[in-house]
Amino acid sequence: MTKLHAIAKGLGATLLLASASTAFAETVNVPATLTVDNTIDFTTTGTLDFGTVRATPDNTTAANCVGLTMPANPALALNATLGTAGAVACTAAGTSVLQAVGGTPTRPEFSIAGVAAFTTLTLTLPTTVDLTTTAPAGSPIFRLVDFTAYRTSGTPAAVTTTVQVDGSGNATFNVGATLLTDPGTPTTSAYENAAYTGNFDVQVAF
């Protein structure tokens, strides 16, 4: 083999290797997107209604009061058992009276929908809510304390700080509370024969 031929052969091999290692590439641009929707379909029906009561406040000493509890569990009736906040507020009954005498007590029902399956949501219930009517300043009020919740969907059970939705992203629960006669010292000693009303918030959150 001549020297020239050997050089040519070596160059051919080098070009072949270079050709074999050369890659041809194409690039495409792919968009990425998402939509944020943190909305919770949260609705309520009904009201927290203790019906008709007979009530007398004790205006001689603060913390002389009594209560009437509406359990969140719809299978349970009104009762005079006080929860923690009620027991703290009412250390003695004095002359206070609170009795259910009629009407149709009802609980509000809350519905959750449109949430990812089996999501656990944080539940926030109110602490204290006052019920009042149009009356002179210093008239006695009613106070709601010891709010509770009871899940009525899936496996019914009491819920406290969280509520979990089912496989379809739904859940329902009721709310109850304890109604107290005025735990303070109102300047008048009688309730009006009237409706006493107030409002409260219930929140669920991710």
Image (spheres, helix red, strand yellow):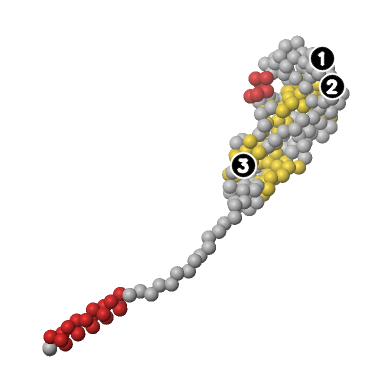
Question: Can you identify the residue that label 3 sits on?
Answer: 205
Residue kind at label 2, given as amino acid type: Ala
Tell me the quadrant of the picture where the N terminus can be found: bottom left
Q: Is residue 127 visible?
A: yes
Identify the residue position indicated by label 1 in the image: 188
Residue type highlighted by circle 1:
Thr
The image shows residue 205 at horizontal and vertical percentages of 61, 42
Q: Earlier in the sequence, mark 3 or mark 2?
A: 2
In the structure shown, which secondary structural element does the residue marked by tag 3 occupy?
strand
Which sits in the foreground, 129 or 26?
Answer: 26
Q: CA distance from mark 1 to mark 3?
A: 42 Å
Residue 58 as seen in the image, left or right of residue 85: right
Q: Quadrant of residue 24?
A: bottom left
Residue visible at 68% across and 48% down in the picture: 41
Residue at 28 percent across and 76 percent down: it is 18
Judging depth in this view, the residue of 109 and 134 nearest the camera is 134
Which of the two residues, 109 or 125, is positioned nearer the viewer here?
125
Outermost residue to the right:
193
The answer to whether residue 137 is above or below residue 36 is: above
Answer with the quarter of the image where residue 202 lies.
top right
**Neighbourhood count class around disc 2 (C-alpha, 10 Å): few under 14, some 14–19, many 20 upward:** few
Mark 2 or 1, nearer chain start: 2
Circle 2 is placed at which residue position?
A: 135
Task: Residue 23 in the image: state x and y as whole percent.
Answer: 35, 74
Is the residue under label 1 in contact with that under label 2 (CB below 8 Å)? yes
- Disc 3 vs disc 2: Cβ atoms closer than 8 Å? no
Point 59% across, 43% down: residue: 206
Query: In terms of secondary structure, where does tag 2 sit?
Result: loop
